[in-house]
Structure formats: C-alpha cells, structure tokens
Image (tube, rainbow, N blue to C red):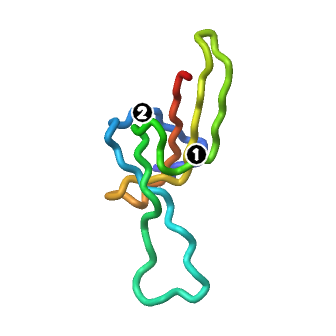
Amino acid sequence: MSPREDKDALLGRLRINSKLRCAPPPRPSQPGPGRPRKHGEILHPGWDSPEIPPDEDITAMHLKGELRLRRWQQLHFEDVADTVFGLWIKNNC
C-alpha cells in the first residue's frame, strides 16, 4: 500500500457539535521541560462564527444568491492528532 499524498481527498460531513484542534504553536528556541504540545486552539465548525479565523475566505455570486466558502488547514481530532486534514465550510449568505 502506498502512502497518502497531498492530492488524495475525502469528502465527508461533520457532526454539528464536532470539536477540532489546530496545529500547536511552534516550540520556542529554548524549550522548557516536558513534552511538546500536540494541540493548538479549538475550532467548533458548527458555530455560526467560529473562534479561529479561516485561512481562506471566498465569497462568490451563485444562481441562488451569494455563496461563502471558508477553509481551515492543519486540523485534527483531539484523539487522533497524527491525522491532519483541511476543512471547507459552505454557507449561503
């Protein structure tokens, strides 16, 4: 089996009460004792205005009105920090 590549994609749906974690902040040049952090800030994608600004925010006209796409990168679920993915959220304005 070959390793997954950047071009691989999976389309799915998240529960409205999902909680995702961002990548941790970079380690300082002189790290203190303890292991490095695995998680960064929390993102609740089901909220109307998520706590973390998106990496990309696109608004375009569509046949049925305005369409808004927001994208976050480098997210993971808290229990599986090694599985990193990106998230797109579509909203009709």
Q: How far is disc 1 from disc 2 in space, using C-alphas?
A: 19 Å
Asked which secondary structure carries label 2, the reply is loop
Asked which secondary structure carries label 1, the reply is loop
Which residue occupies 42% across, 55% down?
42
Specify whether 24 is left or right of 46. right
30 versus 86 height, above or below? below
Specify whether 13 is left or right of 10. left
Name the residue tied to disc 2.
Answer: 12
Which residue occupies 66% across, 33% down?
58
> Which residue is farthest top?
63
Q: Mark 1 against mark 2, which lies toward the viewer?
A: 1
Q: In which quadrant is the C terminus drawn?
A: top right
Which residue occupies 39% across, 37% down?
46
Q: What percent of the width, then of the height, locates residue 44?
A: 40, 46
Residue type at mark 1: give it.
Answer: Pro
Q: Are marks 1 and 2 in contact (CB under 8 Å)?
A: no
Question: Callout 1 environment at 10 Å: few (<14), some (14 to 19), or many (20+)?
Answer: some
Q: What percent of the width, then of the height, locates residue 47?
A: 41, 39
Q: Compare residues 83 and 70 and report the one nearer the observer.
A: 70
Which residue occupies 39% across, 33% down?
13
Q: Do we see residue 20 in this rendering?
A: yes
Q: Label for residue 54?
A: 1
Quarter of the image for residue 18 reads: top left
Specify whether 85 is left or right of 62. left
Q: Earlier in the sequence, mark 1 or mark 2?
A: 2
Q: What percent of the width, then of the height, locates residue 76?
A: 43, 53
Q: What percent of the width, then of the height, locates residue 53?
A: 57, 48
Residue type at mark 2: give it.
Answer: Gly
